[in-house]
Amino acid sequence: MERAVILSLALAAVLCSAGPSRAEGDLYSREFRVCMDKSGGTATDMLDCIHQEHVRQDRLLNANYKKAMDAIGKVHGKTGQRGLKDAEVAWLQWRDLDLPLFQYAGGGTFSQLRAAEDLLEKTARRARFLGDLAGMVQ
């Protein structure tokens, strides 16, 4: 039990301190940071915070994908859009295939938290990439 508490607190510290540099900007929402602060290192609460942020980031991912498709379509037509769609399908497959690898990291709460955070980070970074891409194409 004591080990689980120590691992949860260590992960909370990593999650709260990890992420992009100031030059890159905040990757996650303010709501996520507040939620994680309030979790007190409780695994269940942390997983809930991560899930809520993943929902926000997934919505942003979809919105930015649509913006990128529109921007690429205006400049490169259907061929460019087909390329982006193919890339996005491949990225989603890679993201989803990569997640089960955390089962080999010892299992337990720490692995669950790390897998959830990994999915969140990948989704947030892809959402940002697609938003940047839409802005560059125009």
Image: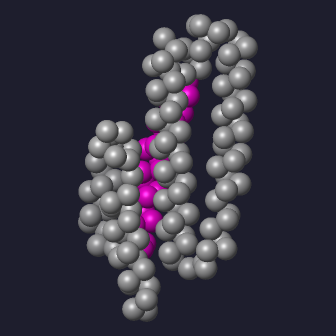
Q: Identify the magenta region.
A: 43-66
Q: Total label count?
A: 0
Left or right of 36? Residue 113 is right
Q: Residue at x 42, y 63 (%)?
A: 48
Q: Is residue 124 visible?
A: yes
Left or right of 118? Residue 37 is left
Image: 69 above or below 122: above
- The quarter in which the N terminus is drawn is bottom left
Measuring from the top left, give residue 4's x and y in whole percent: 44, 85
Q: Residue at x 64, y 49 (%)?
A: 95
Image: 134 above or below 6: above
Measuring from the top left, give residue 5's x and y in whole percent: 38, 84
**Residue 63 among magenta residues:** yes
Judge by depth and name the residue closer to the eye, 105 or 115: 105
Q: Residue at x 56, y 28 (%)?
A: 65
**Residue 14 among magenta residues:** no
Judge by depth and name the residue closer to the eye, 111 or 51: 111
Among all residues in the image, which is located at the extreme bottom? 1
Left or right of 102? Residue 51 is left
Image: 81 above or below 22: above
Measuring from the top left, give residue 101's x and y in whole percent: 67, 65
> What is the quadrant of residue 11 in the picture?
bottom left
Q: Is residue 29 visible?
A: no
Q: Residue at x 71, y 23 (%)?
A: 83
